[in-house]
Amino acid sequence: MMLAFIILGALTLVGGVITIAARNAVHAALGLVGTLLSVGGLFASMNASFLAATQVIVYAGAIMVLFLFVIMLLNANQPVTGRDPVPFVRELAGIGGTLLAGAFVVLAFTYKDPPALAQNVAALRGGTAGAVGETLLTRFLLPFEAVSVLLLVAIVGAVALVQRPVPQPDGVPDTEPAGVLSPDTSLVFEAVNQEAALKQTVLKERGRA
Amino acid sequence: MPDWVIQLLITLLKGVGVALGLLTTFAYMTLIERRLLARMQIRLGPNRVGPMGLLQPLADAIKSIFKEDLTVTLADKLVYTLAPIIAIGCALTAFGGLPAGPPGSLFGADPWVYNLDAGLLALLAITSMGVYGIFLGGWASGSKYPILGGLRSSAQMISYELGMGLSVLGLLMLVGSTSFHAITHWQANNGWMILFQLTAFVLFLISSFAETNRTPFDLPEAEQEIVAGYLTEYSAIKWALFQMAEYVNMITASAVMSTLFFGGYRGPQFLEGLIPGIASWPYIWLFAKIAAFLFLFIWVRATLPRLRYDQLMRFGWKLLLPVALTNTVLTAAIIAFSTGRLRVWLLVLLGVAGVALLIGFSDRVRVLWTTPTVRREDVNLTPARPAGGD
């Protein structure tokens, strides 16, 4: 058990370092996949098999595939060069990292022993879905529902962001939702719009013929 | 030797045995598939190497191992090599959790490699990692058609994973456990699950075809459109590894469907009257069920044309997912509000109604009564009936 913890913990750290250090966005994403998988393994080694499976299905299996999908679709896998446009980003990151490290130090020194192992194992009931579901829907009902509302808001926001501007009558230029989209995304939208316009003209021509 | 070393050795042996068994099945599966397809299309198929072509898989294996292993200049070397390994690794790992017989029937050992409480969930987790093989292979090839195939496959697999996961929820509620042993045991007491969850079975079957990238869902390697999709730049043993992964996934999907809906490693109970104890003979029942499903995979490949990409997405999101959700909710309601014989009849009714709904709203039947909708970009366009679907 201890051996498994050491190996998986090391793998988690290695994955995290790759995520930050890799120059290629796909390699970084793969490092993150490694981290998430190792965390799933950590859950499994602690007998929380339901959490482990969910971790792998949701994070490593679905969310990271979407990450990679976007990276490949926008061809964002080129190595990043040049200066960061956000001012003071390094300094801010340094302060944030220091604060986080400090928090971990405080945590490590104020650590209290958890309840006895036998008690914990009984509460887990083999780490099956039943124990997790019961806790989620009784003791943590309010946070659970709040998270689902948050996800709904995120979905509505995503739909609102990618909505095409309403076509204007001739002569009035379409207003792009400027400032919201990064240059890459707006390029994609432009390409899509151009394609749609082209298609429309072709169809018109065909209709006339 | 201490006890845990012996246990570890036994597990390792079982793992290697399962891998070898799966790969041998894969080799002969390719031959059987080619012969069967040939028969369905009134041809002969490969019959030159060995008696009845039985040595063909060996010849194919020798060829793929000794062929030159090409790597494209623009390929990302590391990921390019990693992709087939991920694909075959996930495919082989997934099978180990399925019980092939009652405990202790493998010369005193248990006939499975690992046994997790979250059995079905763990299997879904492992197969969901398999998408990375295809996806990364497509990207790492550094050329146009592979990346199109990779993008298609990831979109397709994520879409159908949802339908697959949702379809088994009703089953899990009935059994009350995610472990394959509990599911098999429940079916031995109550009868095969397909009687209670017919809709779930049909949804799971369709999703399995999509998850294993088989016709009619083999969009990622549609040869008329994108050469061979993610496989285009691969050759020799790496190509063979991808093929292996596809067939091993098919075998695993067949085994999962047998375990979830057809009683797993247990045979039909009524045969007990003829030969006592026949229903709990290990291996033969599971293998027979797997073989039946593999035949179905080949049969469908010879029968159905490939879907268009928009049809695939529409079917997955607008039909499969809502039907799976409805099935889950109604099953939960039936379990909550009825008992005994009434519950069984309601579940059977739900299953039949769900399948009727699926067939009625599928693209092949719906067009019989709905007027085809054409997106009218121009009013001068004469309405045309597009080929296939609406």
Image: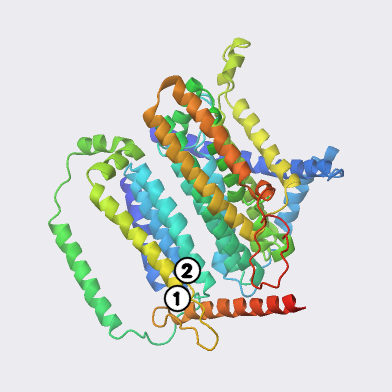
For residue A201, above or below residue A17: below
Observer-nearest of B212 and A145: A145
Q: How crowded is mark 1: few (under 14 residues within 10 Å), some or many (20 or more)?
A: some
For residue A182, above or below residue B246: below
Q: What residue type is labelled 1?
A: Arg
Q: Which residue is drawn at 41% across and 63% down?
A: A32
Q: What residue type is labelled 2?
A: His
Observer-nearest of B336 and B85: B336
Which of the 4 image quadrants contains residue B303?
top right
Q: Which residue is the site of mark 2? A: A27
Indicate the secondary structure of the residue bearing disc 1.
Answer: loop
Mark 2 — on which chain does it sit?
A
> Where is residue B91 drawn, in percent x and y?
56, 48
Q: Where's the N terminus of chain B, which quadrant?
A: top left
Q: Which residue is drawn at 50% across and 53% down?
A: B129
Q: In this view, does B34 lie to the left or right of A175?
A: right
Q: Do the residues labelled 2 and 1 touch (CB within 8 Å)?
A: yes
Q: Which mark is residue A23?
A: 1
> Where is residue B354 drawn, in percent x and y?
55, 38
> Where is residue B93 drawn, in percent x and y?
52, 45
Q: Residue at x 68, y 42 (%)?
A: B297
Report how many numbered discs are placed on residues in the image: 2
Q: Distance from label 2 to label 1 (Cα)?
A: 8 Å
Decide if residue B81 is in sight here: no
> Where is residue A75 drawn, in percent x and y?
53, 75
